[in-house]
Amino acid sequence: MASIFTKIIKGEIPCYKIAENERFFAFLDINPLTKGHTLVIPKQEIDYIYDLDDTTLSDLHLFAKKVAKAIEKTVTCKRIAVAVIGMEVPHAHIHLIPINKESDVLFTNPRAIFSSVEMTALAKEINLKLD
């Protein structure tokens, strides 16, 4: 059975897409910790990030870096936190979370709420700042 992320990649489930190439996909988290919280995934459905082959793993991080730099240009923050938890969806993924303090990255924090209009505009703005 395809993961929810695979369904997003295939367009079966809508998302707020930021970036895509032939191997990777980035989109806004619909339950963000902070404004700009983004998920970066390989298109290949592999459950555990450290089961990715070395080339895919390193290329995933380089793709995430490009996305993180665009987020930094769009959302006011001190850093982009990187989190790999891998328990909630059986598809390798990286969380990019704009933060101003360490506690902003606690997954037990209440989630930020943004309208569909705000999320669409934010995804477009981040996309326009990709190098």
Image (cartoon, rainbow, N blue to C red):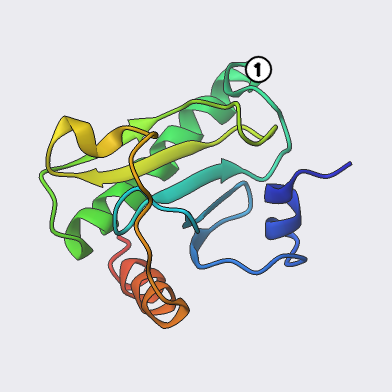
The foreground one among 109 and 6 is 109
* Quadrant of the drawing holding the N terminus: top right
- Left or right of 48: which side holds 68? left
Residue 23 spot, x, y in % from top left? 62, 46
Q: Residue at horizontal 49%, vertical 34%?
A: 59
Q: Residue at horizontal 67%, vertical 45%?
A: 43
Residue bearing the label numbered 1: 51
Tag 1, which secondary structure? Answer: helix
Task: Quadrant for residue 70, please give it.
Answer: bottom left
Q: Residue at horizontal 58%, vertical 16%?
A: 50
- Left or right of 12: which side holds 120? left
The foreground one among 16 and 19 is 16
Total of numbered circles in the picture? Answer: 1
- Left or right of 100: which side holds 66? right
The foreground one among 94 and 57 is 94
Is 94 rendered above or below residue 110? Answer: above
Residue 85 spot, x, y in % from top left? 50, 25
Is 29 rendered above or below residue 3? Answer: below
Q: Residue at horizontal 71%, vertical 39%?
A: 44
Q: Amino acid at mark 1?
A: Asp
Residue 41 spot, x, y in % from top left? 56, 43
The local crowd at label 1, few if under 14, some if 14 to 19, many if 20 or more residues have their Cα within 10 Å, is few
* Quadrant of the drawing holding the C terminus: bottom left
- Specify the farthest residue to the bottom: 117
- Left or right of 30: which side holds 50? right
Is 95 rendered above or below residue 53? Answer: below
- Specify the farthest residue to the right: 1
Residue 103 spot, x, y in % from top left? 21, 32
The foreground one among 54 and 30 is 30
